[in-house]
Image: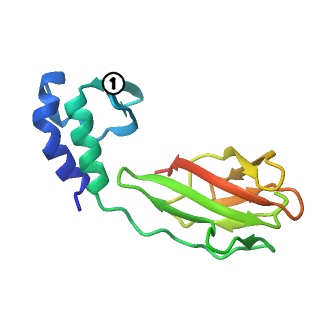
Amino acid sequence: MATLSEILDGIKDLIKPYSDNPNELVDATFSFATDEYVGYEKNGVMYKLKSVALVNKILTLLSAAEQEDPFYPAPINGAIMVTGDELRYYKDTVGAVHLTGAVRNTDGSQACIAVADGYTPDRDITFNLVSSSNNTINHGTIDSDGKIYITVPDGDTAHVNLIYRAGE
């Protein structure tokens, strides 16, 4: 498994034609990758590197990077997790938090789970989600304290797939 430092070492030679400072990506946040571009943000500015060789090398190294195991928090306030697709969260190799899974019996008036310190966003985030029985769009919120509120029609199941940056 590769660390982010090993990934950057592995692509420095490929970055040199695009940058005078191959270490510029050390504090960068990779935000997207396509088959032609890798996008990253540094100091609030978005950059795009165009190189199929670079993109392929970064994607290969990122896929080999170690990722932590997901956390499965206990439901609270009467929420029910869907067996086999319980709500869970983890940080990926670049530090983004992934919240995914399904939950029932939650009307959004009380938190259904909470994420641990280090996984909380620095501001409240409202997101859309789909309920399964009638494919309606509902909403959820994760507040800056890590409490997650999900609104789903009575008896229905909400499917969550959210990626966000944890606050510092």
Name the residue beneath numbered marker 1: 48
- Mark 1 Cα within 10 Å, few/some/many (few <14, many 20+)? some
Q: Give the residue drawn at x 51%, y 59%.
A: 119
At which x and y percent is residue 133? 82, 56
Find the residue positioned furthest to the right: 154
Could you tell whether 82 is left or right of 34 in the image? right
Q: Quadrant of residue 32?
A: top left
Side of 55 relative to 126 (left or right): left
Of residues 115 and 145, the one nearer the viewer is 115
| Residue 141, percent from left and from top | 71, 51
Q: Residue furthest left?
A: 13
Q: Name the spot of residue 142 as percent of width and height, x first.
A: 66, 53
Which image quadrant for residue 56?
top left
Q: Is residue 77 above or below residue 161?
A: below
Residue 21 placement: quadrant: top left
Residue 26 in view here: no
| Count of marks placed on residues | 1
Residue at figure coordinates x 63%, y 66% from the top left: 87
Of the residues shown, which amino acid type is indicated by label 1? Answer: Lys
Residue 35 x %, y %: 34, 31
Image height of 115 relative to 97, above or below: below
For the question of whether residue 151 can be seen, the reply is yes
In this image, 93 relative to 76: left or right?
A: left
Left or right: where does residue 91 sit relative to residue 47? right
Could you tell me which secondary element the residue under label 1 belongs to? strand
Q: Which residue is located at x 14 percent, y 45 percent?
A: 10
